[in-house]
Image (cartoon, rainbow, N blue to C red):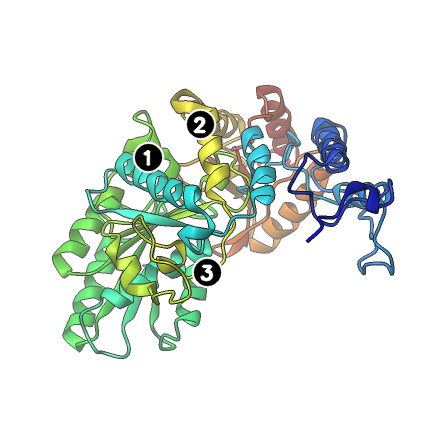
Amino acid sequence: MQACSESQHPPDRLAPFAIPSAEDPVLKNFLHRSSDLLCRWIGSADRSSPVPVMRPLPDVAPGLDGASIESLLSDLQQVMDGAYQPSHPGALAHLDPPPLTASIAAEMVCAGLNNNLLAEELSPGLTGLEHDLCRWFCHRIGLPAGSGGVLASGGTLSNLMALVAARAALKTSHRDPVLLCSQDAHVSINKAAKVMGLADDALQTLPVAADGGLCLEALAKRLRALQAAGRPCLAVVATAGTTVRGAIDPLSDLATLCRDAGVWLHVDAAIGGVFALTARHASLMDGMESADSITLNPQKLLGITKASSLLLLRDRTHLRQAFSTGLPYMEAPRGMDHGGEIGLQGTRPAEILKLWLGLRQLGEAGIEATLSGALQRRTAFAAQLDPEKFTLLAGELHLLAFHYKHGDAAAAGRWSEDTRQMLLSHGYMLSRPFYGDRFCLKAVFGNPHTTAQHLSDLSGRLNKSLAPA
């Protein structure tokens, strides 16, 4: 078959598919110009707002004829003009840091490769890379030989797969197992219970202690009650970094309790798990290495472009047990497993590439510097808030929630709403979560562009937002 040549397409149009027999100069130029737009957008972040003032509405439907190169670039610019800007120094609302530069490039290469992690023959080198990098994470965390994992498109999916694996490993035919977690566990646990078709009362939440961690006494009491009632516990879900407070459940004690009770322990460490990668901060995650399964999201602090989540298992054979179908339409893998046989997803892009290349770019020193910087910014900011005006919610990681110390919940709500808008007008974006009985403000300090001067200015504006008590 005759391959399409460049001459068959108008000079102002991209060929639908790049020619496989020669370098495509039109595509090369288009990618360069697209990169120019992106670099210009990132490089002007601090001259706008974290959220756009105006949100352009580009045409949605394709035209009768394909769009020209200039039209495509204009479309891209419109999307950028209406996008959230994580590189803005005042972007402090959520767990969405600026993208790591090597990860940006890897994302583009991933799209160009268009390999499919469903099966080894569709992604021969990348399948092995995923297995090997998951084993590296397991080793760094302290999981034993025989551990392993799989990448997933987000922590919600990783948590779901972990609980499906736990159910497959549950040695009982009881139809109504119970899932236990703290009241501050991530909403994805609730989603998982629904998707898995568990009983209406299957997900049971437990109170947290003053430090925001799961109350051990309450968990022990509930496990005893379940045993007395003859109802099995599917899993205990511990959280290593709650969404509002950044609190860490008592992982070592939970691991002992679950081991003695013969219960699967899953640690949702989507927020905090990366701290286990460095000797300086690994103590924050003490006990995580005793878990049966772990969710870890490098996208939330290390800047790996979305999505980047890992599910790691103490015994990786549980993944095959839960998800293997045989893939009869694929050749048997030469390595360990097809990617589609150890997780819920079938077709998957090569997300491993941006994680691997990003970690290679950072190196050991860069990983530690990124983690340390986030914690230091949080500490510096907290020290500058007026303790007579604010109540800080306890937590150990790089996020800080706080609320109006005096007045009732209604007053706190009005203050948080007005103050958030005031801060946005000055280029600072904080989130406004509801926690306990009132609205708070929350800042996340994973943005490396946020300087000491920004923190001083932000805390000063917050302190001035309230009159002296």
- Element type at mark 3: loop
Answer with mark 3 or mark 2, whichever residue precedes in sequence. Answer: 3
Q: Is residue 185 visible?
A: no
For the residues bearing labels 1 and 3, Cβ distance under 8 angstroms: no
- Element type at mark 2: helix
Answer few, some or many: residues within 10 Å of disc 2's Cα (few below 14, many 20 plus, some between 14 and 19): some
- Element type at mark 1: helix
The picture places residue 106, in percent across and down from the top left corner, at: 55, 36
Q: Is residue 264 left or right of residue 334?
A: left
Q: Quadrant of residue 166?
A: bottom left
The answer for how far apart the CA atoms under marks 1 and 2 are is 17 Å
Instruction: Name which residue type carries label 1.
Output: Ala
Residue 273 vertical placement versus 187 (above, below): above
Answer with mark 1 or mark 2, whichever residue precedes in sequence. Answer: 1
Q: Residue 360 got which mark?
A: 2
Q: Is residue 283 visible?
A: yes
The picture places residue 148, in percent across and down from the top left corner, at: 29, 47
Judged from this view, the residue extending furthest toward the left is 260
The residue that appears at 19% across and 74% down in the rendered structure is 172
Residue placed most toward the observer, 168 or 155 = 168
For the residues bearing labels 1 and 2, Cβ distance under 8 angstroms: no
Q: Is residue 385 left or right of residue 325?
A: right
Q: Residue 276 got which mark?
A: 1
Can you identify the residue that label 3 sits on?
346
Instruction: Name which residue type carries label 3.
Output: Gly
The answer for how far apart the CA atoms under marks 1 and 3 are is 29 Å
